[in-house]
Image (tube, helix red, strand yellow):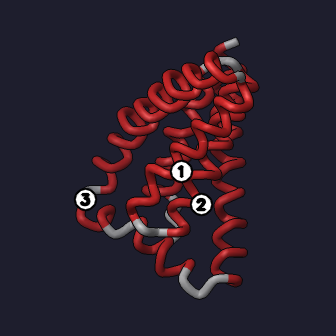
Amino acid sequence: MRGRFVFVGILSAVLLYAIFWVGREVSTALFPFASREIGNVYVTKAELNPAAIGLLLFFIMGPAEEIYWRGFVQETLSGRFGQMTGLFATSAIYALIHIFAFNVMLFVAAAVCGLFWGLLYLREGSLVPVILSHALWDLMTFVLFPFN
């Protein structure tokens, strides 16, 4: 089972990265503000060492976010209101947390990620592939192949 979780985690990270690549192409073609807002997501990254960012994202941020959002929030809301309501409520809250950046593209990205990882958690019934997916996606998106 662990081998499957690793495979699913890696594959889902690549799939989500591809979704974001297409999303960037479409959004920058449709919305004049998209390129600027996508670039703004990377502003603080320029001030830090890429290796440090990668290590923090892969080993701390991705796992911690998934343990909290899927392992605690989604699990709690799903237990109380049902799986689908728990999934959508958690995804909405996850997206709304990002609204305070006043960046439409970041808000949409958070909504897509929240829904994607929430569905992955429901499908697999384990945090392992979701944590790996989030950690790898963060690494690809913010260090290895950024969208800015």
Q: Count the marks.
A: 3
Q: Which residue matches tag 1?
A: 95
131 relative position to 50: left or right: right
- Residue 86 lies, in percent from the top left, at 64, 29
CB under 8 Å between discs 3 and 1: no
Q: Where is residue 67 in the image (x, y as percent from the top left)?
A: 47, 25
Going by the numbered disc 1, the residue's amino acid type is Ala
Disc assigned to residue 142: none
Q: Taking 61 as reference, is 140 above or below it?
A: below
Residue 115 location, quadrant: top right
Q: Name the residue under label 3.
A: 48
Q: Disc 3 versus disc 1: distance between alpha carbons? A: 25 Å
Choose the circle earlier in sequence order: 3 or 2: 3
- Position of 3 compared to 136: left or right? right
Residue at 54% in and 83% down: 33
Badge 3: how crowded within 10 Å, few (<14), some, or many (20+)? few
